[in-house]
Image (cartoon, helix red, strand yellow):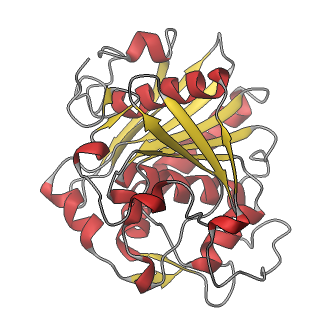
Amino acid sequence: MQLPKNFTPPTVATTFSEDDAGVIQASTEQIDTSVLRAQLAADSYCRKVVPGGKWDCPHCSSAVEDANIELTFTTAQDDTNGFIITSKSQEMIFLVFRGTNSIRSAVVDMKFIKKKYPSVGKGTEVHAGFYDSYVSVQEKVLTTMGQLFTKYPDYKIDITGHSLGAAQAVLGAMDLYQRNSHVTPSNTKLYTYGEPRVGNQDFAAYAKSTKIPKIRTVHAADMVPHLPPMSLGFVHSGDEHWIKDDKSNATEICSAEFESNACANSAVPFLSFLDHLTYYDINEGLCLK
């Protein structure tokens, strides 16, 4: 793996406080865009899509009406799944990872062990299970995305995922950024839903240093974004979009260098696994309407 473009080892903060954060309300446009990406994340749980290869599911047409499936991927060992689609009308390439949906992928989630993140800098570590599960589909993803960048050089790139898939989406975005000069902050966006903490503070700083826009959405008291615990050295990066009201989809945006205590962290310790299963009233996990 080549060294990341323009990477300088960052100076990182050691504490996280809402004093560092600004809180604003998400616009209707921001919410509408996030809803569509949450639908894509939900589509990845549908067996007709993955591994079936058919764009036929409850939210398929509403998310991307003219989707062309370029690749579906699945692994036997750790149950890593997802798809790549293109949209001519949107001029977009979408890379989507499925979240925890089996005992095998749940085991990946529960390994709270860090390992060195390659080629970024000494001390940069990531969750070993998340990283290894991404690597199991790395070659297929990189090859297909590279081919699509050549075929559609003007298309934008969207990368998304829910739960374990959100962690894999982060790792996939960083990998593509490092390996392909076509991937830049101006043409790439990352949307995650119920994302667990992917790495340590140095990794969070690196992800932020790429300047790839990242929308990390948390629903109410969803417990998964609070795992692995910060006490083990894991931390999120970037802005957080916190869904506070299910009826109106009212969403607050907390801006901070790393994590803010003003959004979802304020729900600790009163967390809920049920809040992990829906985002913007979209079921994530069961391929339901």
Image side of residue 43 versus residue 27, left or right:
left
- Where residue 207 appears, as percent x and y from the top left, is 67, 64
Q: Position of residue 271 (x, y in %)?
A: 29, 58
Query: Image point 60% across, 78% down: which residue?
Result: 201
Residue drawn at x 30%, y 46% is 276
Q: Residue furthest left?
A: 103
* Residue 213 in view, yes or no: yes
Location of the C terminus by quadrant is: top left
Q: Find residue 32 and report its image quarter.
A: top right
Report the number of discs: 0
Quadrant where the N terminus is found in the figure: bottom right
State the residue at coordinates (46%, 60%): 266
> Which one is in front, 50 or 30?
30
Q: Residue furthest bottom?
A: 122
Image coordinates for residue 148, horizontal then vertical, percent: 64, 33
Furthest residue toward right: 6
The picture places residue 186, in percent across and down from the top left corner, at 82, 40
Placement of 224 over or under 7, stated as above or below: above
Residue at 49% x, 9% y: name it.
Answer: 65
Nearest the eye: 46 or 144? 46
- Residue 245 picture quarter: top left
Relative height, residue 89 to residue 4 (above, below):
above
Residue 107 lies, with reference to residue 271, above or below; the image says below
Would you say residue 118 is visible in this rendering?
Answer: no
Quadrant of res 20: bottom right
